[in-house]
Amino acid sequence: MKVEQIYTGCIAHAAYYLESNGEAAIFDPLREVQPYIDRAAKDNAIIKYVFLTHFHADFVSGHLDLAKKTGAQIIYGPTAKPSYKIIAAHDGQVFRLGNYTIKVIHTPGHTLESTTFMLIEKDGTEHGLITGDTLFIGDVGRPDLAQHVIADLTQEKLAGYLFDSLRKKIMPLSDHLIVYPNHGAGSACGKMMSKETTDTLGHQKEVNYALNPALTKQEFIKAILTGLTPPPGYFPKNVLMNLQGYESLDTVLERGRNALSPEAFETAANENETLVLDTRNAADFAKGFIPNSINIGLEGNFAQWVGEMISDIKQPILLVCNPGKEGEAMIRLSRVGYDGTIGYLEGGFASWENAGKDINSLNRITAEEFEKIYNTEKKLVIDVRKRTEFQSEHIIDAVNIPLNEINDHLSEIPKDKPFIIHCAGGYRSMIAASILKQRGWDNFTDVIGGFTDLAKKDLPKTAYMCPTSLL
């Protein structure tokens, strides 16, 4: 069977391309659809269907643009009722794609409309399952997201539905089936996904904790709800965009491709509620940046951290990028629904410098310098890694304020004494540093290389949780 996984690492997302006899189908496409159109053209195939496993929360799907540009039909599973035209397929319904068959298996749990699609060869052999967020490699989809959109859908109720879907619909299927999930490790849609992006169903039955046949329904519900962290704030907003529709990406990009001189950029930046987002790497940003800008680097999990740290999905955004990266930044913003880019600094930060505009910078130290300061001055250390990372190992007396919670703890961060911040490698701590600088903090230093480098030093460390309050 000709099925191709198209994986996008920055948001740990997998779309799928299926082609047979000149007909193609795309499963769970990203916002930018031209790569799928080009892929089908390579096979001289027409895109006949766009299949959606559910209303996604962690990204805005490209199904509307893809259908408009290709004439493909949009297929959801039962109970899906968006504000645009679809085929809401019933459980067991089949669709023909060339010589292949695609069978609908309604698997509610992650969401009510969640659906798995079975891929069947031309001779009737069952090949694999496109599982969406119902079944991951090593995990299952979290059942607590839909309650943020539909209040009476409690996480316990959805977890019960998921138990039934897995036990009655998925686990009875043949062990040889290949599992094609929508996400891999790093996605916030699960809590312990494997780095592997495909596996056999038989192996998952052996190693996936959620498929343990010995678990009762109540034990299953407890197991998958234990340890869930709060979902990113942009998740419900992405669900609504996928339900209600959105602007074409072409329109979003056209509006954002507005190259601004330093003078015009400065004027636009002074408009109310406009955010200057610098997408350069942490080292370059620390050396010099536009006052009041925040840094979220393109080289990391850019879209996810934008979604975590910028609360207003309609936020007007001005971009500072390395020249030639503006389009990439806009596309990656749009993947998570941030369509408010109104322009970018022409020529990048160098043009701002050359124009003699005001510049800020941030202090950074190496792990070696940190070691000397820690052993002599005992400065306050703020660790912005996740709580699980901090609990695993951290510097003694460090205080844990995870990056995604920092806006809720600003009142606890002192302005009257110096402190040091770090994360695992320097990416997240620079986001935190830029936010603190924007909010008026000047009394801190960032650690280059973060805990990865600190762990190599002879510093006192512990795996026990330290107090999270600075008071």
Image (cartoon, grey):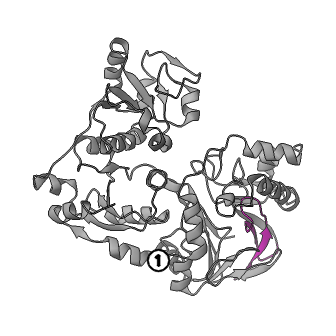
Residue at the (20%, 60%) spot, across then down? 266
Res. 402 visible in picture: yes
In the image, farthest residue toward the bottom: 71
Count how many numbered circles sit on residues in the image: 1
Q: In which quarter of the image is residue 151?
A: bottom right
Q: What stretch is highlighted in magenta?
A: 98-124
Residue 110 is one of the magenta-drawn residues? yes
- Given residues 394 and 14, the one toward you in this image is 394
- Given residues 276 and 142, the one toward you in this image is 276
Q: Quadrant of residue 172?
A: bottom right
- Given residues 461 and 9, the one toward you in this image is 461
Q: What percent of the width, then of the height, locates residue 163? A: 83, 54
Q: What percent of the width, then of the height, locates residue 53? A: 68, 68
Quadrant occupied by the N terminus: bottom right
Res. 325 visible in picture: no
Q: What percent of the width, then of the height, locates residue 94? A: 79, 79
Residue at the (33%, 53%) spot, across then down? 279
Q: What percent of the width, then of the height, locates residue 180? A: 68, 60
Q: What residue type is labelled 1?
A: Glu
Residue 461 drawn above or below residue 230? above
In the image, farthest residue toward the top: 376
Residue at numbered disc 1? 247
Residue 181 drawn above or below residue 461? below
Residue 291 is one of the magenta-drawn residues? no
Residue 349 drawn above or below residue 395? below
Judged left or right of residue 338, residue 350 is left
Q: Residues within 10 Å of mark 1 (few under 14, many from 20)?
A: few
Secondary structure beneath dot 1 equals loop
Judged left or right of residue 408, residue 191 is right
